[in-house]
Image (tube, rainbow, N blue to C red):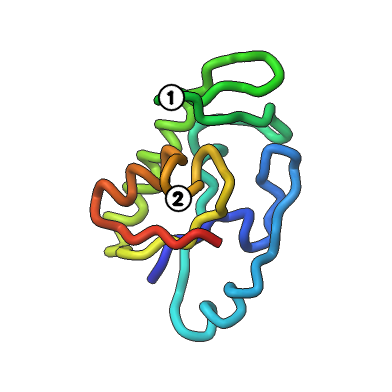
């Protein structure tokens, strides 16, 4: 069992209300089960929503300057909880996302801090 970014399954949950079907999912689905999660939506953010950037330790709206760190943190904790409950050790997360981006996204960082391998897709 692995975790994937919900938008990588083509589900329209990105901030622009779109999704990206990633080809790796076809091969992955033949080999193992997966759970798809959108940390941003689980954190309470709507669709569509303002695009954000990670600035230091905060997630800031690019248009309004609003601090969305609390919502992103709540979503990251939800993703970690899903991983723990299901024994998930690997997550395939959307690159260039303030939530899922490997190395800087809040969810990706929290998962890695807890020993879950994050693979950028």
Quarter of the figure that contains the N terminus: bottom left
- In whole angstroms, how far apart are the C-alphas of marks 1 and 2? 15 Å
Depth order, front residue of 16/113: 113
User: Residue 46, located in which quarter of the rendered image?
Assistant: top right
Residue of label 2: 102
Residue of label 1: 56
| Residue 30 image point, x, y percent | 53, 85
Please, which residue is most extreme toward the bottom here? 30
Rendered residue at 40%/25% (across/down) = 57
Rendered residue at 67%/44% (across/down) = 14
Instruction: In the rendered view, tell whether residue 6 sits above or below residue 17.
Output: below
User: Residue 23, located in which quarter of the rendered image?
Assistant: bottom right
Q: Secondary structure at mark 2?
A: loop
| Residue 21 image point, x, y percent | 69, 64
Depth order, front residue of 99/34: 99
Label annotation for residue 77: none
Question: How many numbered circles does the render carry?
Answer: 2
| Residue 73 image point, x, y percent | 41, 31
Instruction: In the rendered view, tell whether residue 103 sits above or below residue 5.
Output: above
Rendered residue at 62%/60% (across/down) = 8
Disc 1 crowd rating (10 Å Cα; few below 14, some 14-19, many 20+) is: few
Quarter of the figure that contains the C terminus: bottom right
Q: Could you tell which of marks 1 and 2 lies nearer the N-terminus? A: 1
Depth order, front residue of 118/48: 118
């Amino acid at each position: 069992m692995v975790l994937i970014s919900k938008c990588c399954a083509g589900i329209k949950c990105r901030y622009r209300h779109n999704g990206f079907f990633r080809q790796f999912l076809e091969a992955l689905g033949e080999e193992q089960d997966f759970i798809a999660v959108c940390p941003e939506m689980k954190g309470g953010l709507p669709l569509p929503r303002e695009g954000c950037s990670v600035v230091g330790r905060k997630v800031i709206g690019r248009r309004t300057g609003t601090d969305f760190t609390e919502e992103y943190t709540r979503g990251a904790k939800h993703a970690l909880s899903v991983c723990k409950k299901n024994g998930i050790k690997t997550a395939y997360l959307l690159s260039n996302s303030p939530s899922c981006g490997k190395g800087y996204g809040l969810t990706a960082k929290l998962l890695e801090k807890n020993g879950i391998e994050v693979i950028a897709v």
